[in-house]
Image (cartoon, helix red, strand yellow):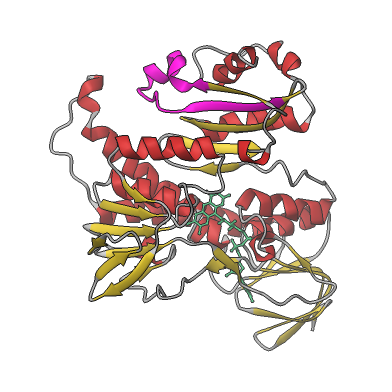
Amino acid sequence: MEKFDLGIIGAGPAGYTAAFHASAKGLSVVIFEKDEIGGVCLNRGCIPTKTILHSSEIYNEMLSSYALGVTTENIHLDYTKVIENKNNVVEKLRKGIELGFKNSKIKVVKTAAEILDAVTIRAAGEIYECGKIIAATGAEPRELKGLEFDHKFILNSDDILNLEKLPRSILIIGSGAIGIEWTRIFSNFGVDVTLTEFAEHLLPAADIEISKRVERIFKTKKIKFYTETTVEKIDKGIVTLTNGEQISPEKILVAAGRKPVTPEKTDGVTYIGDVCGSIQLAHFAIKQAIETVDGVKFDKTLVPSVVYGTPEIAWVGLREQDLEEGTYRKVNLLVSALGKSHCDNMTDGVIKLLTREGKILGAHIISKEASSLIQQILIAMQNNITIDMLKEVCFAHPTYSEGIFESLWRIS
Ligand SMILES: Cc1cc2nc3c(=O)[nH]c(=O)nc-3n(C[C@H](O)[C@H](O)[C@H](O)COP(=O)(O)OP(=O)(O)OC[C@H]3O[C@@H](n4cnc5c(N)ncnc54)[C@H](O)[C@@H]3O)c2cc1C
């Protein structure tokens, strides 16, 4: 039997962050991983999708770059290379974490582990006694009734990363972050995409005006989508939707949320990350890990959401539908008002601020660099920085950030 100060199950963002922070404090740490180091985020989530997205954006930009003075000929898409590049990026980052474990003298046990009680873990027949146990076992794709994964025709977000060639057409079910990102990837690559959403609008977790604007952007890009729609039946490859449409996609991607890997919990064990089933985002998992190990608290109501693609979509804080009419002010600044958006040929989008009594309650952005813009607003919100104080800040020109500055002066 080996003894450690801390035993961690799962080496995703929650687990590896907890391990590094505990080791930096001088604790002896053992971490168990049944699959690849880096978890879903690195191997099947954030990183691989954004790498493929980047390839798709380059491809799409090249197709229309003549208007910007760049003529390209014989543009050729080699999807095998796209996947090879994705695999290289993932592997490089994974080796970085593995090296970090080695340098920090964190013991890595590459097998499934089982919690016996609040201080005991069993893995591959060995017993590990730990002063404290953190379970960071993550989440897995949720199946829908009648749309069970067969991993050939009906795919989940893991399967879709392993396609050897692009499908001719695809039906994507669910317009959360994963569904929207894959819709953008496939449509950039020229795949015939149909997106369905059960709720009234795309991206149901977003501010309603943002959802409607995303719908408008999709319409201008001729991306087919149906809201308040799901699959009624599938018969011999023909999919009948609840709105009566019939399509024959080569593949179906079900992107309908994720369920915790470990549904039952052991008393005395700390659960962090996606396994908690609340906010399933890598940065939330990382902050929970740091809170658990270092005691550095964070405001769970101020967690940014980002949906990647062109343009990016990001938000934090309250949405318009969360607020009672007449109790807030709002400003919508079109990104096309910013010189930089014209320089970049990226004029689609909006910066929307919801405010009350001189403070920002929520920010909702569709823009190039929205993922970074939202962070600036979040820092202001979290630190009670008022709109008047922000007006004193000097924003660089030409940038998208100056859109935040411009918005402040339009709050009536
Ligand atoms: C397609 C996709 C795209 C995403 N994009 C983003 C994004 O852009 N930004 C973002 O913030 N989030 C994104 N996410 C979500 C993000 O990946 C998760 O929030 C994050 O990975 C959660 O980290 P975690 O450590 O809690 O769990 P995980 O990353 O799931 O790691 C859990 C680990 O535990 C291991 N494990 C489970 N049970 C055991 C056991 N019994 N013994 C040993 N090991 C075990 C698993 O093998 C896994 O490696 C995306 C997810 C998907 C699916």
Q: Which residues are magenta?
A: 333-355
Magenta run includes residue 319? no
Q: Is residue 400 visible?
A: no
- Where 171 sits versus 381, above or below? below
Say left or right for 274 vs 87.
right
Quarter location, residue 411: top right
Q: Is the residue 232 above or below the residue 362 in the image? A: below
| Residue name at image x 60 percent, y 78 percent | 111
Q: Dividing the image into 4 quarters, which one contains the N terminus?
A: bottom right
Q: Relative to 27, is 349 on the left or the right?
A: left
Give me the residue at 38% from left, 25% from top: 346
> Where 88 sits versus 338, above or below?
below
Farthest bottom residue in view: 125
Residue 151: x and y in percent read 36, 73
In the image shown, does 35 or 138 lie closer to the viewer?
Answer: 138
The image position of residue 220, as x and y in percent, is 30, 34
Q: Which quadrant holds residue 275?
A: bottom right
| Image quarter hosting the C terminus | top right
Tell me where residue 108 appears, x and y as whole percent.
66, 69
Q: Residue, x 69% and y 27% (percent of image)?
A: 326
**Residue nearest the observer in this picture, 258 or 204:** 204
- 346 in the magenta segment: yes
Residue at (76% x, 51% y) in the render? 290
Please state the quadrant of the image where ligand 1 appears: bottom right
Q: Position of residue 228 (x, y in %)?
A: 43, 55
